[in-house]
Image: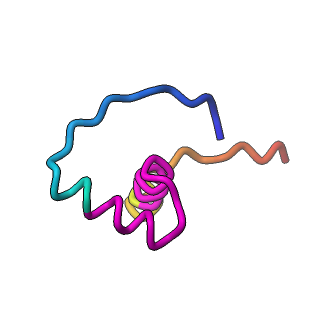
Amino acid sequence: MGERKPFLLRIDRETLEAVQRWADDDLRSLNGQIEFLLRRALTEAGREKRKETGD
């Protein structure tokens, strides 16, 4: 994983609370859950950055 950069996210309270409950269920931090969900969405949409294999 590359360099981490801080990012301000404005989100409605109900959505934030729902994601926090989901993070708690998955034993992740709220930040970790948001990153997990974003990576999964990128993968499913075929938009993730391809990793260099060096072959």
Left or right, 13 with respect to 1, comes to left
Q: Is residue 27 above or below residue 29?
A: below
Q: Which residue occupies the extreme right position in the image?
A: 55
Between 43 and 29, the one lying in front of the other is 29
The colour scheme used here is: rainbow
Left or right, 53 with respect to 47, comes to right
Percent position (x, y) of residue 27? 54, 66
Main secondary structure found in the magenta portion: helix
Image quadrant holding the N terminus, namely top right
Q: Which residues are magenta?
A: 18-40
The answer to which quarter of the image holds residue 2 is: top right
Q: Is residue 38 above or below residue 27?
A: above
Q: Is residue 39 above or below residue 54?
A: below
Q: What residue do we see at 21% from left, 37% from top?
A: 10
Between 32 and 39, the one lying in front of the other is 32
Q: What residue do we see at 45% from left, 27% from top?
A: 6
Percent position (x, y) of residue 52? 72, 43
Percent position (x, y) of residue 53? 78, 47
- Asked if the stretch drawn in magenta spans residue 21, the answer is yes
Q: What residue do we see at 61% from left, 28% from top?
A: 3
Marks counted in the figure total 0
Q: What residue do we see at 28% from left, 36% from top?
A: 9
- Asked if the stretch drawn in magenta spans residue 14, the answer is no
Percent position (x, y) of residue 17? 25, 58
Q: Which residue occupies the extreme bottom position in the image?
A: 25
